Amino acid sequence: MKENKKTIYVLLTDTGTFLARAIKWFTGAPYSHVSIVFDEKLDEIYSFGRKRPRNPLIAGFIKEDVYYGTYRYFRNTNCLLLKLDVTETEYHKIRDKIQAFENNKDLFSYNLIGLLGVLFSYPIALNNAYFCSQFVAEVFKESGVDLWGPLHSALVTPNDFLLHPRFEYVYEGKLYDYPLLDEEILSNTIVGHTLYDIKPIAFLKKILL
């Protein structure tokens, strides 16, 4: 019997942070961060990134929040939302994999050195450490969704998701212009400036708090 299809989303973003700009400079791609999403309203988003919105030095597995998390400090974030149809079996495997990360989130760290591996086309896979696109690619791979064949997950970049023919475009533009976001929550949570509107001393205070 043919299985019913389920939809998984992938969110590509560019916040304009120093790291984001560095990644874009190395890759020449428009987006520097990728997350796996379970719903079109962006209520359930997972990736590897900042654990504390104001401190880029502490990073690991995170459940992202477009209303109360890191994105609210970068109101001009650009994004591309993609969708991918998978079987029910694959969908539940993806769910189980994410839950395993969630259950053990304190064991995981950010694979910063792995980004250098991408630069030199040499995969650097550390135990319990991932960067964002490596994490999403590995979740798909271990769930039976074969997107890149023998390509190591530690060499997959956000741009590989953008270019992959299996993904369909849903929305591209400013994250906070996405029409399915809750406007009432946005009006109460989005701060009135970005970190780049802040003077240097104030900026240091923000990221170190």
Image: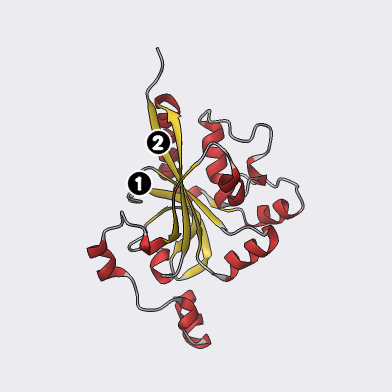
Q: Residue furthest top?
A: 1
Picture quarter with the C terminus: bottom left
Residue 20: which quarter of the image?
bottom right
In this orientation, which residue lies closer to the viewer: 72 or 63?
72
Q: Is residue 39 left or right of residue 81?
A: left
Choose the circle earlier in sequence order: 1 or 2.
Answer: 2
**Coordinates of residue 174 in the picture (x, y in percent):** 43, 63
Q: Which mark is residue 168?
A: none
- Tell me the residue that label 1 is attached to: 40
Q: Is residue 86 left or right of residue 152?
A: left
Q: Is residue 2 left or right of residue 27?
A: left
- Evaluate whether residue 93 shows in this view: no
- Tell me the residue that label 2 is attached to: 7
Q: Residue at x 38, y 42 (%)?
A: 38
Q: Separation of disc 1 and disc 2 at Cα?
A: 9 Å
**What type is the residue that disc 1 sits on?**
Glu
Whether 54 is drawn above or below 139: the answer is below
- Evaluate whether residue 200 shows in this view: yes
Whether 124 is drawn above or below 84: the answer is below
Picture quarter with the N terminus: top left
**Coordinates of residue 159 in the picture (x, y in percent):** 60, 50
Q: Is residue 93 left or right of residue 26?
A: left
Crowd class of label 1 (few under 14; some 14 to 19; many from 20; radius 10 Å): some
**What type is the residue that disc 2 sits on?**
Thr
